[in-house]
Amino acid sequence: MALLFYHLPFLPFLFLFLHFIASLSSPTQNLNDTLSFSFPLTSLRISPDVKVQTLSSSLVAGASKHGTRRLARPNSGSYNYKTTFKYSMALIVALPIGTPPQTQQMVLDTGSQLSWIQCHKKLAKKPPPTASFDPSLSSSFSVLPCNHPLCKPRIPDFTLPTSCDQNRLCHYSYFYADGTLAEGNLVREKITFSRSQSTPPLILGCATDSSEDKGILGMNLGRFSFASQSKISKFSYCVPTRRTKPGVSPTGSFYLGQNPNSHGFQYINLLAFPQSRTMPNMDPLAYTLPMLGIKMGAKKLAIPMHVFRPDAGGSGQTMIDSGSEFTYLVDEAYNKVREEVVRLVGPRLKKGYVYGGVADMCFDGNPVQIGRLIGDMVLEFEKGVEIRVPKDRVLADVGGGVHCLGIGRSNMLGIASNIIGNFHQQNLWVEFDLANRRVGFGKADCSRAAV
């Protein structure tokens, strides 16, 4: 099982099943230096019936001629790269892709593996989205042919087999949990930070769509995630709070490599599972945390610890996901949270209202007063590590004067997992230390951390 990319009803691509285990056909170069990013977080409302189409033959013909050029190996050295970002629902990082670089907006998603970009041939008769990628302009772009090791009908964990399309290129298709389909061609392309610094050519998805220009930066533990292909040892981000002055958008930070703030982080080890152990309800490539319980106000909720741990079938896995806005809990945990909310502010609940079909702890009263009555919410982990959500941020503004607790039922999404979304990661450094298989947390004013 893979994790949330976008959420119902406004986030249609859910739970990518992108766990490739094939090996790359050529070695990659390590990114040994630290990259410093700030990235935009913007609201994405993509129609659930959108299907990402394959590359047209004219686009491929224009791009593939560059794929055979031999490129000079980039020099190593220290460098920093920064850009700005806005946050409301998803984390959108702007990355310079190709040679020369074209800036592409991509959802930073720790719950998925394959990174993909929106590709488009810039034709005069039909202007593409301004931020789409034109492969014909990049000398480092190349397509994967049908004889590539990835292009086999039995690659494990593809929801649909890869195939050879009419242009003799490797075609991929993925079904998301909400039934939508993403498809395109597998390609190689590098991220070029400067003339002297770039990643090695990475396996990416290259898709065309006239209505959307956002891609995905897959950052899970899979072999083909951006993090794995780039050989980075760690990455971290800091999500700012949503509330700002009118006309001002919050800005957060994203680091690849060493974070200068990490000296104050508290770490917990990721839960590990034998690869030979098959669990149908579990995503083995997710960042699975050893969660212990939940507190609301000063009260520890009576939720057994096993609710947050995967059982023999994988149900109960607790994962942290930057691509999920809300937090989702399995029924046994969700019901206990709701019981406490009813006890504290039951008369103020918006009767008969269920946001997005998953969240029914919603209010149309004064959110400040309701937040004070609910109190702080704390997610507890091993080693005394916790994520504390202050009472003034326990409610999410979902529009129309309605505010919800920011927690949904995971079974309404058809999954049996607990997911910690980015709403509950605000004003918090979250570091994914891949080398040591751990996740670190550090309190921060994330709007200042980006300065």
Image (cartoon, rainbow, N blue to C red):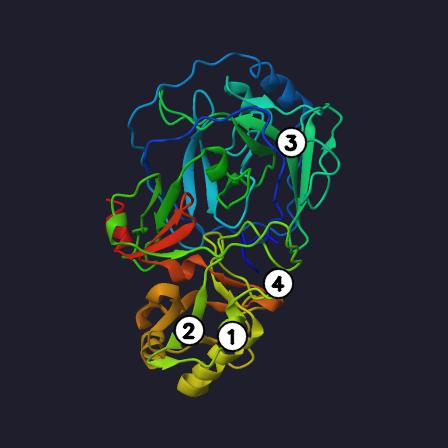
In the image, residue 185 above or below residue 51 = above
Occupied quadrant, residue 144: top right
**Residue shown at the point (52%, 52%) measured from the top left:** 286
Of pointers 1 and 3, the one earlier in the residue sequence? 3
Q: Is residue 78 above or below residue 114?
A: above
Q: Is residue 404 visible?
A: no
User: Is tag 4's residue or tag 1's residue first in the polypeptide sequence?
Assistant: 1
Give the spatial CA distance, label 4 vs label 2. 20 Å
Q: CA distance from mark 1 to mark 2?
A: 9 Å
Q: Point out which mark residue 333 bears.
A: 1
Nearer to us in this view, 46 or 206:
206
Q: Which residue is mark 3?
A: 185
What is the distance, in whole Å, between disc 4 and disc 1 at their CAs? 14 Å
Q: Tell me the number on the disc at residue 415.
A: 4
Q: Residues within 10 Å of mark 4 (few under 14, many from 20)?
A: many
Q: Position of residue 347 (x, y in %)?
A: 44, 87
Mark 2 in CB contact with mark 3 (< 8 angstroms): no
Return the residue nearer the eye: 272 or 103: 272
Helix, strand or loop at label 3? It is strand
As measured in the structure, the alpha-carbon distance from the residue carrying label 1 to the one carrying label 3 is: 41 Å
Look at 32% across and 33% down and name the residue there: 81
Q: Secondary structure at mark 1?
A: helix
Instruction: Determine which of the numbered discs, if any, sits on residue 294 in the image.
Output: 2
Q: Are marks 1 and 2 in contact (CB under 8 Å)?
A: yes
Residue located 51% across and 65% down the image: 328
In this orientation, does residue 209 appear? yes
The residue type indicated by label 2 comes to Ile
Specify which label sits upstream in the sequence, 1 or 2.
2
Q: Position of residue 364 (x, y in %)?
A: 43, 76
Q: CA distance from mark 2 to mark 3?
A: 43 Å
* Dot 2: element: strand
Mark 4 or mark 2, which is nearer to you? 2
